[in-house]
Amino acid sequence: MEATGEVKVFTRQSTGLTKEIGTLDTFVYNVNNQNIGIGVAFVLLFVPGFYAGADLLQGVVIALLLALPMALVYSFFAAAIPRSGGDYVYISRTLHPLLGFVASWNWVAWMTVYIGVPAAYFAQYGLSGLFRTLGVASGNAGLVDLGNRFVDPVWILAVGTILIAFFAVIFSLGTRTYFRIQNSVFVIGLFGIAIAIGLAFVGSSADFAANFDRYVSAAGGIANGSSVAIEPAPYDGQQTIFSSTLAQFIVLFAITSSFLGGEVRRARVSQLVGMPGGILFVSVFMILLVASLVQLVGLPILGGISANYFSPDALGLSFVPAYNELVAAAYPGNIVIAFLLGFTFVFWTYVWLPINFIASTRALLAWSLDGLLPRRVSEVNADRHTPTVAIVIVAILGWLSLFMYTIGIGDFKLNTLYGIFGWILSFLVCAIAAIVFPYRLKAVFDSSPVNWRVAGIPLMSIIGVIATAGLLFVEYIWWADPVNGLDSTTAVLGDDRMKIATVAVLATGALWYLSARFIQARRGVRIERAFAEIPPE
Amino acid sequence: MTRAESIYVVADIHGSEVCWRKFLNAAKFYGVDTIVVAGDITGKALVPLVERPDGRVEAQVAGRVQVARSEAEVAELEARVRFNGFYPYRCDERSYAELDADPEHRDRVFTAVMAQTLRDWLALADQRLHGTGIRAILMPGNDDGWYVDDVLAESAEVMNSDGRVIQLAEFQILGFGPSNRTPWHTTRELDDDEIARRLAALEPQIDPDKPLVVATHVPPHGTNLDVAPKLREDLSIVVDGGETVMVPVGSAAVRSFLERRQPVLSLHGHIHESRGAVRIGRTLAINPGSAYSTGALYGAIVTLKGGKVVSHQLVTG
């Protein structure tokens, strides 16, 4: 069969025939979950000093190329199975309910880690830089001192706790308030990025070293801060690939619209543009911001700042400056610029917290409805339509990750990027599901709007193969990267606890599923029936 | 009632043949005694398969115009149309033009196709369920035309519960298909006052000594079984911050009836995205939800014993 001219479908007056959620809405939802500000801050704070010879811009482009096939897998699935639940549903139906649950459990386990971590970022990267840059621009030592306090673990824990509690209350009242706020905040954040790009491009690179010296000195640091500059190493392809972890950390998660729920239909265009389009959009902004900072600051000083991330006392500071402070430093004494850059950057620091909070509560609801968690977890407040029990559970899990990130137990603290290797395993299972989906659920695929074939082979399977290969490579990077890779944790921590934790998350997921199945069976409920396909013939 | 009795309920299959076939097999698959469709059986779209003079057949499927060049390809196309809950309709160019130009003619054709398809479905039900002891209960929902009652009456194995109380050995089931008003002005819509009046009129049929199951297509208002996207006047969905704005759209009269009568179980549909189970006093109220267009049959299995619900489970078959 081939496609040709126009023939109509006639519909009758019936319920549910609504206009679809638009491409723009899907796009915004996905872009919201990609943290341009933190992404660029991390690229600049870690790549120049820890990945000798890495090309910053190439690292972003590599991340983009690796994330695109996976985004296509999720957008194909979202078009073929337009139901809430994301990969929990895709994998459960295509492969096996146990695999679907374990993948979802894995998602939630790591997602809750990234509720606590961004709660910490709010003070650690946001408020600290805002107050210090305001203090320097206004000559107010008290503000500089206040900024320094926000990198103290106890202060980070205190502020993060308030933030998690704040969002728990907001979500208990309903998600609409949050989404209204988030839409505005996103515009503010993007405005800040645009300002930073513009100011960095037009700022004087020739005077930057002198301006930076003045800034560091005014912040209580050494007189010649620019002396930490290091000569960039010659180009190194492997380091460039490893350095892509920092950008991957941002663009791999442009798939949240697959969790958008229910009967609400979305055109395939909405998902196909919304997910990969979101990645492209974010990558362009990241590239522009990184390029503008390289132009303004220069790689030697960026390298020196980055290399001293864990030893800021080399600059005489309590923490090294992120990009917003660097751009502000180029405009000495300009309090308006300092405020705009610092204030708008704050809104990027915590952005994952609420998004992961909502996604986690939705997953808990889905599990509860399927009998994998107690029914009470899926009880929804009739007036506010909010799952109070699920919200409390997620808030507690998020706070635990905040505690482990800031205070820790003994000498063990969570590192920001330790969980990504484990998290990506869920994407990998979904990519594998995409390969077999057109064959295992042939009727669903054939009747879907993405039933394209190339030389008789379903395009979805082809993309699944590409995404699987891409994600295996991604996992190699997240394993072998000497800075952020899971394998490097053995040397850093002195044992294999992060590797064990990664495996334990999967094992506990499987154990939870099997235990729930056993308990429910004793009540006469067979949870394996929840996803079992009834034969139509 | 001492024997455990299991009920499997679905709703809103909207013309999906694969869902209907799964429904008929569900009793054996899940080991239940009674299967129920809580309204909205018929589909929403007619897909003309237009025969061109050169023998090609064209139809719009999944948003694209497809061409079939052989009988096998046409059959494949028809199967894909049915899978989504749409009705394939083979016609020549002249008939297609008439369909396109004359809404009244189109309505007549559409109704005839839906009625015939339902007849075919019921024939299949009679064939599969005969002698099995499985009870199949259907009722039309707000989207089903009035002709559906007459077609259902032709079946030997399927009972229509709309507007009546069906007495079974272990329990009784009160059926009510119409919904409250919707933005689409569908066939079986009533004001809430009228729903309250008609439900009250059914009460004399209720046996006070037997567990009561209420099946109303429309869910009770404000119970999280009735949460649907908020719509503008042009039927576009209101989105706020990338999130669909959801509002309760169920029937206040149904809620009031359930709160007053406190049946052991109430079964609903209508709002596809509001899949769930809630307690309204002593009543367990369930909306199994619907994803008919994907071929997945959303349902719920409920086990009754001793006049109580002993277990329930939402399933995707």
Image: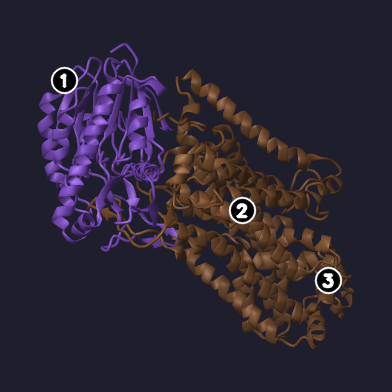
Q: Quadrant of the N terminus of chain B?
A: top left
Q: Nearer the viewer, mark 3 or mark 2?
A: 2
Q: Chain of mark 1?
A: B
Helix, strand or loop under label 2? helix
What residue would you read off at disc 1? B207
Helix, strand or loop under label 3? helix
Helix, strand or loop under label 1? loop
Q: Nearer the viewer, mark 1 or mark 2?
A: 2
Circle 1: residue type = Asp
- Of residues A507 and A378, which is closer to you in this image? A507
Counting residues from the start of the chain, the first of labels 3 and 2 encountered is 2
Give residue A97's quadrant in the image: top right
Tell me if I can see residue A521 in this picture: yes
Circle 3: residue type = Gly
Say whether marks 1 and 2 touch (CB < 8 Å).
Answer: no
Circle 2: residue type = Met
